[in-house]
């Protein structure tokens, strides 16, 4: 029987998101492919340093203990390396004890075209170019932001905290377009009038729904094991404010998903909340929300929608 991916949360991740590949990339840029091959061979026994998304991936994979014989989570490496230079990547994964056994190596060609065929609901890359190209092709892609991995040890080592923006991330950018093309008052009035109408699907909706399935598995475990403490906690962190908050809540209800925490900040800097929440990964479509928090959390820039269009491309209402 083939190994089915359709009922799992599948993450596709590049080496540049999982590991700190700045040294190896510098070798390639400065000295070319042959020098890069030699460098990888010479250091094949040296694990690559942990990257921005490493703690997120580690904690996500740990949730497979909920269903060991039929894992809930699958992480697949998608790399521009060839199989030979990819050996160090796979040995690094093995050295850290990550449960990642599947990989795609495409020697110089961006591998995001395999996202749909592998049922990937989240593609993470360290390359802005690759993340943008994947997003432009309609895939749930993001570029990791930050320079060091969040410490993944401590009393809450088993927890997984995921935070997401709403417009342009979970939902489409239709409401955001009204705000940017008019003004706050018109936007708030529009959202009040359409409070019961769900916003369209955004790039990270499938990822949220897949996380919700894991939360349901945790609730089922708690029924059988009363002392079990759920590990997945999902937060909504959005610049929406009342009365626009209601439409976001009603949209999530229509998707049959529920978040644990919701922050409707109405222009308050998100970094102030993120510094307390300390998610292991945070998704936003605007770099100005991610940069102030990049020393605190692992961020993902979702290159989607009007927030990522050039100003001259955005028409303004008269």
Image: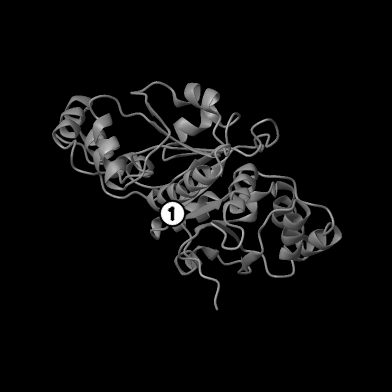
Q: Residues within 10 Å of mark 1 (few under 14, many from 20)?
A: many
Q: How is the image coloured?
A: one colour
Left or right: residue 173 versus residue 30 is left
Q: Quadrant of the C terminus?
A: top left
Q: Secondary structure at mark 1?
A: loop
> Who is closer to the viewer here, 178 or 181?
178
Residue at image x 55%, y 72%? 3
> Who is closer to the viewer here, 242 or 300?
242
- Residue 53 quadrant: top right
Left or right: residue 198 versus residue 8 is left
Residue at image x 18%, y 25%? 185
Left or right: residue 58 versus residue 201 is right
> Who is closer to the viewer here, 59 or 111?
59
Residue at image x 63%, y 65%? 103
Residue 114 on image: x %, y %: 50, 68
Position of residue 78 relative to residue 19, above or below, is: below
Q: Quadrant of the N terminus?
A: bottom right
Position of residue 279 relative to residue 90, above or below, is: above
Q: Which residue position is annotated with label 1?
A: 140
Residue 248 on image: x %, y %: 29, 36
Residue 108 on image: x %, y %: 61, 66
Residue furthest bottom as drawn: 1
Residue at image x 45%, y 31%? 288
Residue 41 on image: x %, y %: 83, 63
């Amino acid at each position: 029987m083939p190994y089915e991916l359709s009922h799992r949360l599948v993450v596709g991740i590049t080496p540049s998101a999982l590991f700190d590949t700045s040294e190896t990339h510098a070798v390639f840029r400065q000295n070319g492919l042959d020098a890069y091959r030699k460098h990888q061979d010479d250091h094949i026994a040296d694990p690559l340093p942990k990257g921005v998304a490493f703690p997120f991936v580690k904690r996500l994979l740990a949730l497979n203990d909920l269903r060991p014989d039929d894992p809930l989570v699958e992480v697949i490496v998608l790399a521009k390396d060839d199989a030979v230079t990819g050996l160090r990547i796979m040995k690094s994964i093995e050295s850290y004890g990550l449960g990642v056994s599947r990989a795609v190596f495409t020697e110089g060609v961006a591998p995001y075209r395999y996202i749909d065929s592998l049922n990937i609901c989240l593609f993470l890359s360290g390359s802005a170019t690759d993340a943008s190209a994947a997003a432009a092709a309609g895939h749930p892609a993001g570029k990791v932001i930050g320079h060091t991995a969040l410490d993944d040890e401590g009393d809450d080592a088993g927890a997984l905290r995921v935070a997401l923006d709403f417009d342009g991330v979970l939902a489409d950018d239709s409401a955001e377009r009204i705000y940017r093309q008019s003004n706050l008052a018109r936007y708030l009035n529009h959202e009040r009038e359409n409070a019961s109408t769900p916003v369209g699907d955004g790039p990270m909706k499938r990822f949220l729904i897949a996380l919700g399935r894991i939360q349901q598995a945790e609730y089922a475990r708690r029924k059988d094991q009363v002392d079990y403490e759920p590990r997945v906690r999902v937060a909504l962190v959005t610049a929406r404010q009342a009365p626009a908050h209601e439409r976001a809540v009603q949209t999530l209800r229509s998707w049959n998903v529920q978040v644990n925490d919701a922050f409707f900040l109405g222009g308050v800097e998100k970094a102030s909340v993120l510094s307390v929440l300390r998610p292991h990964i945070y998704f936003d479509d605007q770099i100005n929300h991610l940069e102030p928090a990049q020393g605190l959390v692992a961020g993902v820039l979702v290159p989607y929608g009007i927030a990522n269009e050039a100003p001259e491309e955005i028409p303004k209402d008269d």
